[in-house]
């Protein structure tokens, strides 16, 4: 079973990094090349414990759907998303955050398995491991870019404003 382990140092607060990592909107920005869109479940804002999102994207020239669920959640230190339905036999993505003196260490641990036993194992090791690593590195690059600049406000302040407006309407 392939495992991708990435560490990303980000000069920001742990809360900003945690929230950007669970932002549906920022995820769509980071996966623009594969035209990934949230189409069911939580489709914008910040995903929380127990919520699901169904993504539609084009990978390897094929339109695909994948549904994942947040199965563990400890703000702002950790969350896990797992595939509920999709092309993988399974995947588990752990997102860990450690506040250091002047930065945050964001750790991704992504374990996955393709279907089709022997053929899937070959595909995992020759193609998918490299492809998924590149996808996750790009996602982390975008999170870092937004967290280290004022861009994070474009994602998170809009979310906070909509929460305040919902409370005000009640």
Image: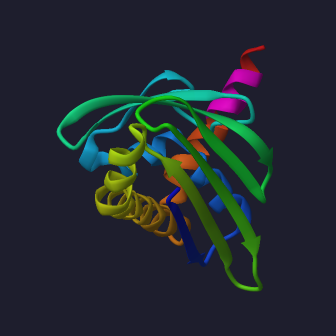
Name the residue located 21 percent from the left edge and 44 percent from the top edge. 60
Visible residue check, residue 150:
no
Q: Is residue 81 left or right of residue 29?
A: right
Main secondary structure found in the magenta portion: helix
Question: Between 30 and 162, which is closer to the camera in this rendering?
Answer: 30
Name the residue located 49 percent from the left edge and 47 percent from the top edge. 113
State the residue lying farthest toward the front: 118
- The image quadrant that residue 49 belongs to is top right
Q: Is residue 81 left or right of residue 148?
A: right
What range is drawn magenta here? 162-167
On the image, the x and y values in percent for residue 87 come to 40, 33
Q: Is residue 115 left or right of residue 78?
A: left
On the image, the x and y values in percent for residue 114 come to 43, 43
Question: Between 68 and 44, which is closer to the camera in this rendering?
Answer: 68
- The image quadrant that residue 84 belongs to is top right
89 in the magenta segment = no
State the residue lying farthest toward the right: 74
State the residue lying farthest toward the top: 170
On the image, the x and y values in percent for residue 141 come to 43, 68
Question: Between 155 and 124, which is closer to the camera in this rendering?
Answer: 124
- The image quadrant that residue 71 belongs to is top right
Q: Is residue 126 left or right of residue 3?
A: left
Name the residue located 53 percent from the left edge and 56 percent from the top edge. 1
Name the residue located 75 percent from the left edge and 22 percent from the top edge. 168
On the image, the x and y values in percent for residue 110 come to 56, 57
Above or below, 31 against 163 in this view is: below
Q: Where does the C terminus fall, quadrant-wise? A: top right
State the residue lying farthest toward the bottom: 101
Visible residue check, residue 132:
yes
């Amino acid at each position: 079973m392939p495992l991708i382990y990435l560490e990303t140092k980000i000069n920001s607060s742990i809360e900003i990094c945690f929230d950007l990592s669970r932002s549906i909107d920022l995820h769509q920005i980071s996966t623009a090349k594969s035209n990934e869109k949230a189409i069911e479940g939580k489709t914008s804002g910040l995903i929380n414990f127990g919520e699901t999102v169904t993504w539609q994207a084009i990978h390897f020239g094929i339109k695909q759907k994948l549904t994942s669920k947040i199965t563990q959640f400890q703000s702002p230190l950790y969350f896990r998303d797992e595939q509920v339905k999709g092309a993988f036999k399974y995947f588990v993505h752990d997102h860990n955050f450690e506040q250091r003196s002047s930065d945050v260490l964001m750790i991704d641990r992504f374990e996955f398995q393709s279907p089709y036993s022997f053929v899937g194992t070959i595909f995992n090791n020759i193609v998918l491991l490299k492809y998924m690593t590149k996808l996750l590195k790009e996602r982390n690059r975008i999170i870092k870019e937004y967290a280290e600049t004022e861009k994070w406000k474009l994602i998170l302040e809009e979310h906070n404003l909509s929460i305040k407006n919902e409370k005000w309407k009640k």
